[in-house]
Image: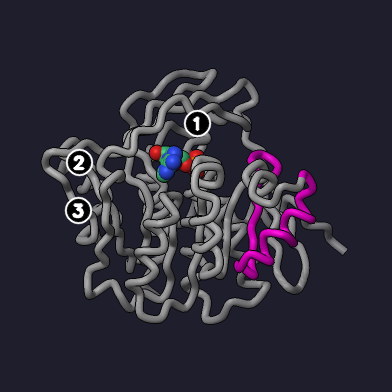
Amino acid sequence: MSILVVGSLAFDDIETPFGNSPDTLGGSSTYIALSASYFTDDINMVGVVGADFTDEHFDLLHSRNIDTKGIQRIDNGKTFRWAGRYHYDMNSRDTLDTQLNVFADFDPHVPEQYRKSEFVCLGNIDPELQVKVLDQITAPKMVICDTMNFWIEGKPEELKKTLERVDIFIINDSEARILSGDPNLVKSARIIRAMGPKILIIKKGEHGALLFTDNGIFAAPAYPLESIYDPTGAGDTFAGGFIGHLSRCKSVTDLDLRKSVLYGSAMASFCVEKFGTERLNALDLLEIEDRYQSFLDLSRIEA
Ligand code: AMP
């Protein structure tokens, strides 16, 4: 199953209580694609970068078999930039700066060979761009969408239009509360699912994730790690692992979705162990399976 990933490609300036990492390769689609690349080698990216995005950055994506023909490079432009500072508990952060740069004038073009993609992952990006991408896909089997407070607060009506066409929506708890206007997550889930996406995942940082479907609620734990260096991209990495596993399932049953949530959680737990994408650049499949197994063991009770 092919996966089309659209979202930001970025350079991030990250500050955590444990150190700083300036000019770090990031962006929602970078994390999603790298994470999903451990599950399938049919990943196509659509996005835009500036001249500061060098061959070395492309090489990293290519080393994971990710197709980047859909990424436009604007020779006189600068890549999207984001700066954030994490609080002491690493669960919350302040955005210090967002520079859209080349994304401000981006008109996404989905190459002909990507238009039959079965899985479309709309990473965190302007919801108007998310819709422009969807308009170019012939008959997607599954549309997965992520977003963040920047767009929930900045373009709420546009985001709601996108959501009408989304099957699976992934957001974090504070974003769910803002979008729904309700502090209770179960009520929030009902309100958000009525906006379109029948399957909703609410991420709760170090407290795991909740999956809401017609059949009920599934709660996945987060991996209890002793050292967390940088949570940047954890949500996108979750989405990549989730969609990566789902794309290799023959169906989309509740069991498939639950396993996908655990694979997403396993991938996110690697992401936070180093700054930026460093940990995601070279994982091996065995350690991913081991971590997945640890997730199962976390809340298993033998009869
Ligand atoms: P996450 O920690 O999963 O929320 O994702 C962090 C990534 O999202 C960083 O690498 C940023 O470059 C990217 N990002 C931050 N703000 C935005 C935004 N407004 N639109 C698109 N991508 C963003």
Kind of residue at disc 1: Asp
| Residue to which mark 2 is pinned | 50
**Residue 66 within the segment the image draws in magenta:** no
Instruction: Locate residue 21 relative to residue 78 in the image: left or right.
Output: right
**Crowding near pointer 2: few (<14 within 10 Å), some, many (20+)?**
many
**Helix, strand or loop under label 3:** strand
Image location of residue 154, percent across then percent down:
50, 43
Whether the residue under disc 3 has CB within 8 Å of ligand 1: no
| Residue to which mark 1 is pinned | 230
Q: Residue at x 12, y 38 (%)?
A: 76
Residue 182 vertical position relative to residue 18 in the rendered view, above or below: below
Instruction: Locate residue 79 relative to residue 35 in the image: left or right.
Output: left
**Helix, strand or loop under label 2:** strand
Mark 3 or 1: the one toward you: 3
Q: Residue 270: tell me if it is visible.
A: no
Instruction: Locate residue 194 relative to residue 114 in the image: left or right.
Output: right
Q: Residue at x 53, y 60 (%)?
A: 242
Image location of residue 155, percent across then percent down:
49, 48
Disc 2, disc 1: CB below 8 Å? no
Disc 2, disc 3: CB below 8 Å? no
Tell which circle, 2 or 3, labels the residue nearer the N-terminal end. 2
Disc 3, disc 1: CB below 8 Å? no
Tell which circle, 3 or 1, labels the residue nearer the N-terminal end. 3
Q: Residue 41: tell me if it is visible.
A: yes
Q: Quadrant of ligand 1?
A: top left
**Crowding near pointer 1: few (<14 within 10 Å), some, many (20+)?**
many
Specify start and end residues of the magenta stretch as a single range: 183-207
**Helix, strand or loop under label 1:** loop
| Residue to which mark 3 is pinned | 72
